[in-house]
Image (cartoon, rainbow, N blue to C red):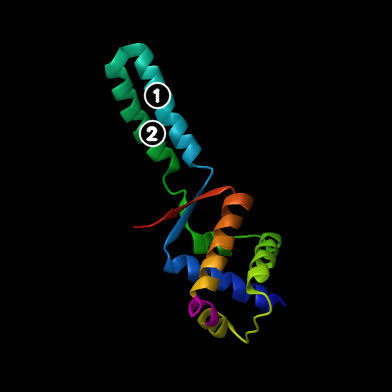
C-alpha cells in the first residue's frame, strides 16, 4: 500500500511540474497588508503624493516580506506529512477509481494519455492544496 501512495504523490509532482504550478502559503496577505497599510499611512501624512510614495514603499516591503515563499508544487507535495499525503491520496483515488498499475511509469502513462483523467486529478490536487493547505496557486509563465 505504501508504494501506491508514493506512486500517486510522484504522479502529482509530475502533473504539477508539467503545468509549472507554484504555491504560496499565507504569504500574500502579509505583502498586501504592508502595501495597503503604508499607502494609507502615506495618504494621511502626505495626501495624494503620500499615497503614491507609501504604496511604492509598501509594495517593495511586501515583496521583500514574501520573497522565497513561492514554492513549486512538487516540493510542497513531497514535504507533506504522512497524514496529509494519505488524505490527498484518498481524494485522488476517488478519481482514479479501480485503475490498476504496477509502477510509477505505468501510472504516469495511463494518466498522461487520458486528458479527462489528467484534468480531474489536477483539479483534485489543486482543490486539496487550496482547501487543506490554504495555499494560493500560481502558474509560472
Residue 20 pos. (x, y %):
41, 63
Asked if the stretch drawn in magenta spans residue 97, the answer is no
Q: Nearer the viewer, residue 87 or 100?
A: 100
Q: Secondary structure at mark 2?
A: helix
On the image, which quarter does residue 51 sit in? top left
Assign the magenta stretch its main secondary structure.
helix
Q: Residues within 10 Å of mark 2 (few under 14, many from 20)?
A: some
Eyeballing the image, is 43 above or below 85? above
* Quarter location, residue 50: top left
Q: Percent position (x, y) of residue 98?
A: 69, 79
Find residue 29 and report its horizontal and vertical position in percent. 49, 37
Q: Are marks 1 and 2 in contact (CB under 8 Å)?
A: yes
Q: Which residues are magenta?
A: 110-114
Disc 1 secondary structure class: helix
Residue in the picture at 34% in, 35% down? 60
The residue labelled by disc 1 is: 38
Q: What residue would you read off at disc 2? A: 61
Quarter of the figure with the N terminus: bottom right
Identified at 58% across, 47% down, the residue is: 134
Amino acid at each position: 500500500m505504501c508504494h501506491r501512495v508514493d506512486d500517486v504523490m510522484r504522479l502529482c509532482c509530475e502533473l504539477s511540474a508539467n503545468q509549472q504550478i507554484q504555491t504560496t502559503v499565507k504569504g500574500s496577505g502579509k505583502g498586501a497588508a504592508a502595501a495597503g497599510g503604508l499607502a494609507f499611512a502615506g495618504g494621511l501624512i502626505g495626501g495624494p503624493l503620500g499615497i503614491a510614495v507609501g504604496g511604492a514603499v509598501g509594495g517593495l516591503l511586501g515583496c521583500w516580506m514574501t520573497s522565497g515563499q513561492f514554492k513549486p508544487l512538487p516540493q510542497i507535495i513531497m514535504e507533506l506529512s504522512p497524514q496529509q499525503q494519505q488524505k490527498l491520496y484518498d481524494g485522488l483515488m476517488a478519481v482514479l477509481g479501480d485503475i490498476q498499475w504496477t509502477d510509477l511509469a505505468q501510472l504516469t502513462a495511463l494518466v498522461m494519455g487520458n486528458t479527462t483523467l489528467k484534468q480531474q486529478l489536477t483539479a483534485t490536487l489543486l482543490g486539496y492544496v487550496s482547501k487543506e493547505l490554504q495555499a494560493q496557486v500560481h502558474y509560472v509563465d
